[in-house]
Amino acid sequence: MRKRQVFMGVSVLLLFGLFLTACTAGDPRYTVQQPAGFWHGLWHGVISVVAFVISLFNGDVTVYEVHNTGAWYNLGFLLGVTSIWGGGSGATWKSAERRRRDEEWAEIGERLEEKILTEIKKWTEEEEHDEEWEEVEEKIVRKIKRKLKEWAEEE
């Protein structure tokens, strides 16, 4: 049973590979008189990485069809590449995600700082409150802020 599943999987992959190679750029059916258009450009963009790998072993296969309609083929190719491989949207999402995470950590840091200051004030008010304690409180607050900032900036 297991051998049959492996055989079927390999067969499907081979058929899929044949299908892809039959539709790649560099096909002799595209000529100056009959250039590849928008839809072929879209397809060539979608399979561009696969076509590149195939082109390493087969000189007849190229990633981009040179006999094309120009701007329309180029538009289709770019849409195909970006729709499958993500284009720049992944970087934008990651940067937005990173910014959101940084904002969350900044908020957590502010809450933590506020809580620590509240606890320090409670602690200093339990003892006799004089100028010495105010100086100690200020030093503690400055040191905690500095240490928290150093800790937050560590990688």
Image (cartoon, rainbow, N blue to C red):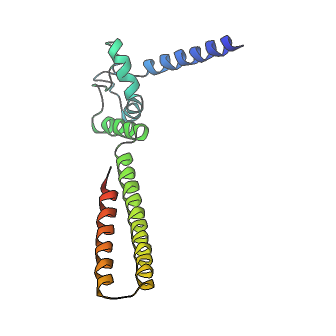
Viewer-proximal residue, 140 or 39?
A: 140
- Residue 35 against residue 59 in the figure, above or below: below
- Residue 121 against residue 76 in the figure, above or below: below
Q: Where is residue 38 in the image (x, y as percent from the top left)?
A: 37, 36
Q: How many marks?
A: 0
Residue 29 seen from this side: no
Q: Residue at (62%, 12%) from the top-left corner?
A: 7
Side (left or right) of 138 relative to 114: left
Q: Which residue is farthest right?
A: 1
Q: Residue at (42%, 41%) from the top-left corner?
A: 83
Side (left or right) of 143 relative to 124: left
Q: Residue at (31%, 62%) from the top-left corner?
A: 147
- Residue 74 against residue 139 in the figure, above or below: above
Q: Position of residue 116 (x, y in %)?
A: 42, 72
- Locate residue 112: give its quadrant: bottom left
Q: Position of residue 21 (x, y in %)?
A: 43, 18
Q: In which quarter of the image is the N terminus?
A: top right
Viewer-proximal residue, 130 or 113?
A: 130
- Residue 101 against residue 114 in the figure, above or below: above
Viewer-proximal residue, 112 or 46?
A: 112
Q: Residue at (36%, 42%) from the top-left corner?
A: 87
Q: Where is residue 22 in the image (x, y as percent from the top left)?
A: 44, 18
- Locate residue 40: give its quadrant: top left
Viewer-proximal residue, 41 or 100?
A: 100
Residue 92 seen from this side: yes
